[in-house]
Amino acid sequence: MKQFKTFFYILVISSVISCDESPKIGVYENTSSAQTSTPEKKEESTYSEWNGIWAKGKNHEIVTLNISNCDENGFEFSLNGSYGGNLGELSGKAMITENGEGFYSNADNGLCELFFIRNQKGILIKSPSQQCGAGMGVRYDGQYKISSKKDDTEAELSFTGLGLAKNEGQAKLIENLVGADKDLFLNSSHQTRNLPNDAKTGAKVKSSGVAGLYGEMENIILLKGNQIWAAVIDAENGEIHYYTNVDEWKQKMPPSIKTWAESIPDKTIIYSSNDGKN
């Protein structure tokens, strides 16, 4: 009697209570026609994949998550965030739940609950209560990605990336005009508003500032084709620096910038002689 040898594969999905990145898939093979051999797992879950520094956000809205000492019982974490000049800080010990998620709860100052979920993008934090003692605008929930030494927000910190210029050509004109004050403009552009066109020049007006730091970190830019009027606060020196590439406005401000400057007390106005051609 002819015997047939049967080959079959058993696909086992193992959900492990751990700090592993995701449930692991193990493949096992049985080549016996009469008996089932003991399966040998080819992949093992690890806890180290949770450890490290993670981050979310961009310009003036950044939160970093530091996870360490992860094992089957849980992990230690710290969160540090900012929303403009408003800050948030939280640290503690999260436990590992039956479904493999991290969970933190504290009721010292209102109920603070955080759920840590490891996924393919990194770590997702859910916070149903939103009562974790952070400053105004600072949120710990959201998707975190592995943090690198290179600033992930670098691409955002440009005149085009921040929406202050409509194209690279216009952005270059602004950069040439403001020169060394470029960083003052970019770093003070957290929240930007479109204001009514300037009454005298007809230029479009964008006013920007940093939440919690208005009066110290602000700027205003007027654009009309290749014509530019701009001003920024230099808080360190107690000054407002004014720039334009329009000759007739070199020693006077358009109404929009004048009104803006008058709302900022105790600052000396410096009229720049830069022609924007360097």
Image: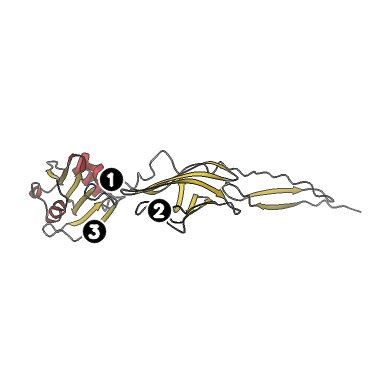
Lower position in the chain sequence, tag 3 or tag 2: 2
Q: Quadrant of the N terminus?
A: bottom right
Lower position in the chain sequence, tag 2 or tag 1: 2
Q: Quadrant of the C terminus?
A: top left
- Please state which amino acid type lies under the numbered disc 3: Asn
27 relative to 255 in the view: left or right: right
Q: Nearer the viewer, residue 35 or 223?
A: 35
> How is colour applied across the structure in the image?
secondary structure
Residue 193 position within the rendered picture, expressed as x and y whole percent measured from the top left: 25, 57
Structural distance between the alpha carbons of marks 2 and 1: 21 Å
Residue 237 position within the rendered picture, expressed as x and y whole percent measured from the top left: 18, 39
Density class for disc 1 (Cα within 10 Å; few <14, some 14-19, many ≥20) is: some
What residue is rendered at 24% in x and 43% in y? 184
Q: Secondary structure at mark 3?
A: strand
What residue is rendered at 10% in x and 58% in y? 200
Q: Secondary structure at mark 2?
A: loop
Structural distance between the alpha carbons of marks 1 and 3: 18 Å
Q: Is residue 276 above or below residue 200?
A: above
Residue that mark 3 sits on: 194
- Please state which amino acid type lies under the numbered disc 2: Arg
Residue that mark 2 sits on: 139
Residue that mark 1 sits on: 187
Structural distance between the alpha carbons of marks 3 and 2: 26 Å
Lower position in the chain sequence, tag 1 or tag 3: 1
205 relative to 134 in the view: left or right: left
Mark 1 vs 3: CB contact within 8 A: no
| Mark 1 or 3, closer to the camera | 1
